[in-house]
Every structure is written in C-alpha cells, then in structure tokens.
Image: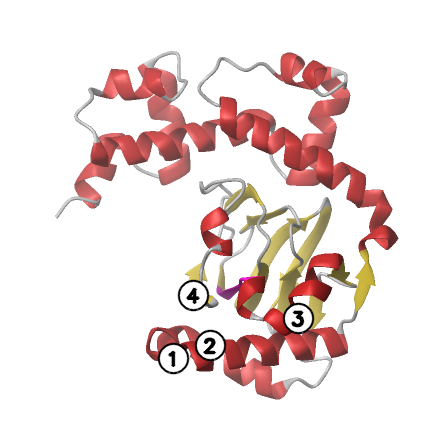
Amino acid sequence: MRVKPRLAVGDIYEVSRDDMPTADCSTRENDNFIPHFHQSIELVYVKKGMLTAIVDGAKQHVHEKQLLICSSYAVHTYMSEEPNETVVMIVPLSSVPSLQKVLQKKVFRHAVWDLKADGMEELIALFPLLPAHWPSYSPEVRKGVSYTVLGLAIDHVGLCENAESKRHGTMRDVLRDVLTYLQENYRQPLKLEDVARHFGYSKSRFSRLFHDYLGCSMNEYLMAQRCRHAAEMLLDSELTMLDIALNVGFECLRTFYRAFHACYQCTPSQYVKNHTN
C-alpha cells in the first residue's frame, strides 16, 4: 500500500519551536510537511515503514530504526510515500545551553543515523516510549533526555563546519529568503516568473531548483500556505467562505475548494465541523 503524498501546512520559519523552554516529543503517522526551518534540532525516529525527507536539498529515505537529524536552520520537508509511524523530537538549543554554541556553528555530518547498524539498542527501545510519557516528564528529565540523545548523536554521527557544506549552504540561504518572501506575500497573485526574476533566476531554473531542493512546486507551497491561513479563519472569523478565499489569495471559490481538499482531505465545511465541538 502506498500513501499519496500531500503537503501538510505550517509556517516556514517555526519561531514557536525555538521559544519552547524544553524539547517536545510526539508520535506521527504518515507525516507530510511543507519546507520549513527553525533554530531547534529536529530528530525523527522511524518506528515503522519509511519516511521520505528532503534536508537542504538532499533527498533521504529514512527506514525503520533509523534517525533523521535536521541540524539548526536546515530547510527540511517530509513526504510519506509509504505508510509510516514516527517519533518526532524537537530540541530548542536554548534548552541545552552547553551544546548551544557548537550546534549553532556546526551541522551533523550525516542526516540519517542507522541506530540498528550502530548497535544503539537503548535508543531503539527508548524512542517509542517517549511520546506517551513526555507530558509527565519534568523539565529536568526532558533536558536529560535531550542531552543524552544529542550527545550520542555527536559522538556517533559527528559534526562538521558549515563551510564544508558549501554546495548546499549558499542555496539554503537563498531558499530561506525565497520561502520567507512567499510566506510574507502569499496573499498576492504571485507568478513563478515574477518571483524567479525577483531573486535573479530564469523561470525554468528557479522552478527546477525549488522542486529539487524542497520537493514541491512553488504553486503547491503557496496553496498550502493559503489553505493554512484559511483554516484558521474558518474557525476564528465570521467571514463568508468567499471572503476567506479572497482574503488568503485565492481568485475564486472553485480553486479554493480544490486546494483545501488536497491539503486537508475534506471540504472547508467538513473541516469546521470536525474542529467544532
């Protein structure tokens, strides 16, 4: 059985992740997420199946008992091409102060750590247990787990200077600027050729770079951002469906309904019903 990949929605720069006092840990199924980044370290342990990820332009297939490591400010995307179950742990650097400076300056040498091949049976046993117990853990326990996991990752995977990743470094900076620009201007009638020109690229070159590095087209990203904001307005405003669609950048209801269903697998009305008690 294959899962049809779709883009879940969220902010490109998740500042809320960096403001958390301690790490967060949760279980996800068939995770899909648009390109995003944050200062925090993001760790994704695959319990079952296989998760596809793109980290700073490099496509990764993360299999059972492997750990995906997204370094600070790495642009990353998740796609579930096959059924999977994962444990996601996000560690704000401020919660691990003795590691903060080095993890801000350096990146992990590899994005995927094969725990089974490295004989890390303790971590293989630990990760599936964390989400259920995480809410009851004290801040001290959460920090202890964070230090343990990151410390082992540093020892076994290693760190390298950002300068050693020059091939992706400059492009990562460009993509951050592009995605931030799109997030700030998603309400406008943006065209691929106009955005490409704004950043000094031809339409074809920009389109290819966007898809190769981020795993989706610019239009797919825009649709996901617009739908996210529309979903918030559906629950928090008294505007009509048409007003909401126009407010977030859609030109007509038909396009809005089609994009919304692609993102949430339901109509806007069903979304409101599902999220209203």
Separation of residues labelled 2 and 1 (CA atoms): 6 Å
Pointers 3 and 4 in contact (C-beta within 8 Å):
no
Q: Name the residue under label 4.
A: 27
Q: Where does the image place residue 137, in percent across and percent down from the top left?
A: 38, 79
- Residue type indicated by callout 2: Arg
Asked whether residue 74 is in view, the answer is: yes
Side of 96 relative to 254 (left or right): right
Quick one: label 1 or label 4, which is nearer the N terminus?
4
In the figure, 81 relative to 99: above or below? above
Q: Name the residue under label 3.
A: 99
Mark whose residue sits in front, 2 or 4: 2
Pointers 2 and 1 in contact (C-beta within 8 Å):
yes
Q: Nearer the viewer, residue 183 or 110?
A: 183
Q: Name the residue under label 2.
A: 142
- Residue 138 shows which numbered tag? 1
**Residue numbers of the magenta segment:** 86-92
Mark whose residue sits in front, 3 or 4: 3
Quick one: label 3 or label 4, which is nearer the N terminus?
4
Secondary structure at numbered mark 4: strand
Q: Where does the image place residue 266, in percent across and percent down from the top left?
A: 30, 37
- Residue type indicated by callout 3: Leu
Quick one: label 2 or label 4, which is nearer the N terminus?
4
Figure label count: 4
Separation of residues labelled 3 and 4 (CA atoms): 25 Å
Side of 125 relative to 210 (left or right): left
Secondary structure at numbered mark 2: helix
